[in-house]
Image (cartoon, grey):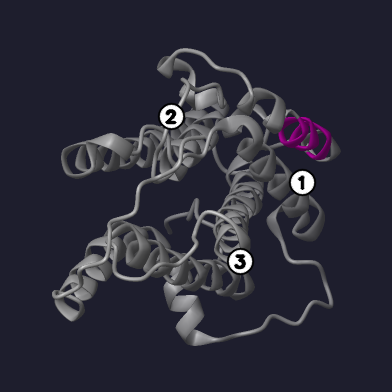
Amino acid sequence: MKISHVPARFPEIDIARGAAVIMMVVFHTAFDLRFLGIAPLNVTTGFFRLLALSTAGLFLFLVGLSLSISAAYAETRLTRREFVMKYFSRGAFIFALGLGITLVTWLLIPSVFIRFGILHLIGLAVMASPLYSRFTWQNLLLGAVFIALGPVVAGIRGSGWLLWSGIHPPLFASVDYTPIFPWMGVVLIGVFAGSVIYPRGKRRPGFSPVSFAPLEFLGRHSLAVYLVHQPVIIALLLLLFSGSTAVPFTMPGF
């Protein structure tokens, strides 16, 4: 009999991830309406800015939560080398998808293309997870440090090669920028939460799981939705508002 190295899915996590997908689609629809000059929505402050930050935060928190569960399960079934290679290869695949997004956005919107977005960060977080996934409260403390240093690092100007850290050139602009300071902190806090809520990768006794099939479906296929939703949204908006004469949006610098 084949032994699975994949833990059972928890529907509540898929539901939360599905909710994040809905939030992402709502924000990107509003963003595209503004970016294409169709509607004068304010997407850089106020409600939509809060929605964008909440969406990214929820996705990254769930990345950490899921890493905690997956790592707890895999550590009991894999050698250390197999464990490291499993997460390195998985993270490298996600990072490669991020590089693909970089290439596509560079070709289509070169002035604000994605140099280090959420897929780049998730890829690095997964590749590095064997270094931190077995810790508990240490991840909470380190995560808080990453978040606290976020504004400090964001105020530092430097080479574009340091974009991954949060240091960036003057007037840098991008349609997606998710550096490790502060966002890696959210992943680490998610790992901590996973170790508390799902000790040893198992749901705590007495917890009654919920179920909502539509959100579970979106949660299970969140990566695929992420990759295709923007072309679909943009195509629909251009089809519906082909006669728009509004002024296109210019991204503000960081």
Q: Is residue 64 above or below residue 87?
A: below
For mark 2, does the 10 Å Cα neighbourhood hold few (<14), some (14 to 19), or many (20 or more) residues? some
**Residue 34 picture location, percent across and down:** 36, 63
Displayed quadrant of residue 109: top left
Mark linked to residue 47: 3
Q: Which residues are magenta?
A: 140-148
- Mark 1 or 3 closer to N-term? 3
N-terminal of the pair, mark 2 or mark 3, is 3
Where is mark 2, residue-wise?
172
Classify mark 3: residues with Cα within 10 Å, few (<14), some (14-19) or many (20+).
few
Of the image marks 2 and 1, the number of the one nearer the N terminus: 2
User: For the point 18% across and 71% down, which residue is it?
Assistant: 238
Mainly helix, strand or loop, the magenta region?
A: helix
Q: Secondary structure at mark 3?
A: helix
Numbered disc in front, either 2 or 1: 2
Cα separation, mark 2 vs mark 3, equals: 23 Å
Looking at the image, residue 136 sits to the left or right of residue 44; the answer is right
Q: Position of residue 240 (x, y in %)?
A: 19, 80
Q: Position of residue 117 (x, y in %)?
A: 43, 40
Residue drawn at x 23%, y 36% as measured from the top left: 110
Three-letter code, disc 1 = Phe
The residue indicated by pointer 1 is 192
Between disc 1 and disc 3, the foreground one is 3
Does 14 sit above or below residue 88? Answer: below
